[in-house]
Image: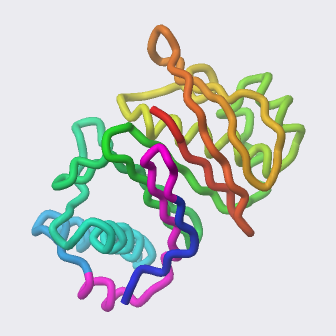
Amino acid sequence: MAQNIILERQLFSGHRLWVCNTQGDLDVLKNQVALTPAEIDKLNSIQYERRKREFLGVRNLVQQQFGKHEQIVYSETGKPMLKESGYCISISHSGDYEVVFVHPTDEVGVDIQVVTPKILKILKRFANEREFAHAEGDVWRSLVIWCAKEALFKWYANGEVDFRHELEVASFDLMEHGELKAWVKKSDPAKELTLRYEKLEDAMLVYTVNG
């Protein structure tokens, strides 16, 4: 059974992205995915069935696209990559969604978040004063800022980052989909990135398109 892909993007820059539904039969997924002994141990240590499906679903998708030999491995800082092909990869989960985003050589970052009004309650924790004002109390605009910063954090993946002061998102016009500028200020000079956002039916998706 093929992974339930509900959105797929292949960019001219070489980036490839898949959004999938995490709902699926756990036993079927187990039979589809080739796991290493370490991955089997990790799967067995996961307590919740939903998390088990997410763990297997991402690997199922990767192996569908890259072959049964492909594995997700992690650097010392926890950044994932594909062992055999060497592709850079970023992964995100929210609600019933899971996202896999890859590029042959460039670092990547992706985040998806199911829409929730709770984002407004925590906005000041991750948004600076300008970003907070730009959000204008709008849930969707706030989700773009949150997902953009999560994507930047995953792109950087080199230690702790202050979301309010070391990750910055430029002002943008909120549409169904669009691009925005953002900066990782952890290094000097700051690294400017372009991100793309897409408003799904009940979630916001943001991903880097350079790096």
Q: For residue 33, which quarter of the picture? A: bottom left
Q: Is residue 22 above or below residue 18?
A: below
Asked if the stretch drawn in magenta spans residue 22, the answer is: yes
Q: Is residue 88 above or below residue 2?
A: above
Q: For the image shown, how many numbered marks are present on the structure?
A: 0
| Residue 171 appears left or right of 162 | right
Residue displayed at 67% across by 48% down: 197
Which one is nearer the viewer's eye here, 118 or 75?
Answer: 75
Residue displayed at 29% across by 49% down: 87
Whole-percent x, y for residue 16 in the image: 45, 56
| Residue 66 appears left or right of 138 | left
Whole-percent x, y for residue 205 in the image: 63, 55
Asked if the stretch drawn in magenta spans residue 63, the answer is: no
Q: Residue furthest left?
A: 37
Whole-percent x, y for residue 209 in the image: 53, 41
Residue displayed at 78% across by 23% down: 129
The colour style of the image is rainbow
Q: Residue furthest front?
A: 12
Q: Is residue 127 above or below residue 1?
A: above
Q: Residue furthest top?
A: 188
Q: Which segment did they paint magenta?
A: 10-32
Whole-percent x, y for residue 2 in the image: 39, 84
